[in-house]
Amino acid sequence: MKRYDDRQRDPRKEVDVMDLNDRPRNSGKRKNSNNIKQNNKSGNYNSQKSNSKKSNTQNTRSVNSAPRGARTKVKIKNLNKEFTIITYVFLALFMCLTIYLMYYVQFVSEDFMNNPYNARLDHLSETTIKGDIISSDGEILATTNVDQNGYESRVYPHGDMYAHVVGYSANGMSGIEKDANYNMLRSNSFFLTKIVNEIAGKKNQGDTVVSTVDSRLQSAAYNALGNNKGAIICIEPSTGKVLAMVSKPDFDPNSIEANWDEYISDDESSVLLNRTTQGLYAPGSTFKMVTLMAYMDQYKDYDDFYYDCNGEYNLSDHSMHCYNNKAHGPENLLDAFGNSCNCAFSEIGLKLNINGYGKLCDDLLFNTELPTNLSNTTTSRFSLNADDSDSTIAQTAIGQGQTMVSPIHMAMLASAIANDGLLMKPYVIDHVQNDQGHVVKNYKSQAYGQLIDGNTAAKMDEYMRYVVTNGTASSLMSDQYCAYGKTGTADFSSDMDKNHSWFVGYAENYYGKEIAVAVIVEEVPSGSPYAVPATKEILDTYFSY
């Protein structure tokens, strides 16, 4: 018996399949190895370079010839990365859209809903009786009467007194009637009451808009202006609430339809114009508040200011005069402001850096839209260039020239000074309530920002108090309150016998109650202090309750 090692082998079975597959590769490797060795020995650089290219080609081929499964995994990985990026992009877009929708619903939607072209308002008026407008102390300022036949008519119990602040709702809309139209055509009555009304075919009662206007102060301001043309606006400095708003000439909103053609054709009186928010006037000496702030900002040694006023300030092409050519004599800056000295402030204006002067005016909201929710507010204008003539600069410094302001803007400046430089945005709607008196929406006060530096505001407080204690507004001295302000007389035409009379300021009592006021009385005899007595009536009324 033969051993296993001695068995006769079959040559055909001796060939290994793996050996056949491996031989060419191993043979090639050995051959390449031998070539490399030979090239290394001979130092043949070109052969090495050729072999290197062949090696790179083989590596490239080996990558391209990777298994199909591996290539599929790479493609899937790339696709997953692309899908991830697209998913995050769409997620970010969705979040932006969601945030915008929230912003739109909270802040913008009512502006669109209140648009008079909104057809939805017509639909609401078919199912809702328009709600009332009342003062902050409960006086009805506008209401809807319904007669036995179901005919509705808008009624304004106080007639002309609230004409511009409340507005009208026929032949278009204005005032609160416009700004809160949607709120008054929306009913938040008890849901069972609404169901019963719907079954009975009755209209629901619209919500009531409660304004910030104080009826006692509004009446005092209306009477203080008398039969004169002009405007008065009162603001609470700490909140921005509009406490009173009067513009004359005025109109009776109860007869707006009957007198419409007459109103729109009377360009001279412009009774439909709300002068408090839309009127533009030369500020006169009230603008010296701005000039004073510019001088304090540019000259840190302003306490050293000295000027000897002889009643006339001569320029190369013009002469400036104090009122009635009065010579105020030696003055420091406080005296010049208290006396409203035109000559001293002409000197101050010519010392100012005009670019810095213009920047301060821009910071104080000139040449820009005023930050308020009140509709139809006009833009105050300040225009002065460094290459302007000395007379133009001097005129601008005392509130003449090309400068134009609105009463609400001047009241906002006074309000900011009274509030340590912080300006609160003026608003006239306090809240909305349903027919049961439950509040459905509050309008909170909003801060615009630090309009004036706190230190500057404190200095202005001192200077504006001096105007009352020792200057041109001494009739505002009272034991009920402390008043601060600046008087002004503005030229508006070639008729020197008539001017606009201004007062801009604020007052406070010992309990912290405050009010900012801007008063302008148009076309009064030159030098007549109409604005200051009107202001006194308002302050005496406000601090009596």
Image (cartoon, rainbow, N blue to C red):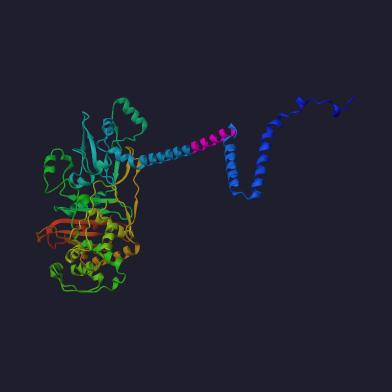
Which quarter of the image is occupied by the N terminus?
Answer: top right
Which quarter of the image is occupied by the C terminus?
Answer: bottom left
Residue nearest the observer in this picture, 146 or 36: 36
Q: Is residue 80 magenta?
A: yes
Where residue 300 sits, quadrant-wise, is bottom left
Where residue 463 sits, quadrant-wise, is bottom left
In this rendering, does residue 483 appear at all? no
- Identify the residue shown where x is 23% and y is 71%: 335
Would residue 484 be found to the left or right of residue 83 on screen? left
Q: Main secondary structure of the magenta part?
A: helix
Would residue 371 be found to the left or right of residue 76 on screen? left
Residue 341: where, in percent of width, then height?
Answer: 19, 68
Vertical arrangement, residue 504 with respect to residue 186, above or below? below
Which span is picked out in magenta? Answer: 69-84
Residue nearest the observer in this picture, 1 or 454: 1
Q: Is residue 308 magenta?
A: no
In this rendering, does residue 57 appear at all? yes
Residue nearest the observer in this picture, 509 or 501: 501
Residue 207: where, in percent of width, then height?
Answer: 31, 38
Residue farthest to the right, as pictured: 1
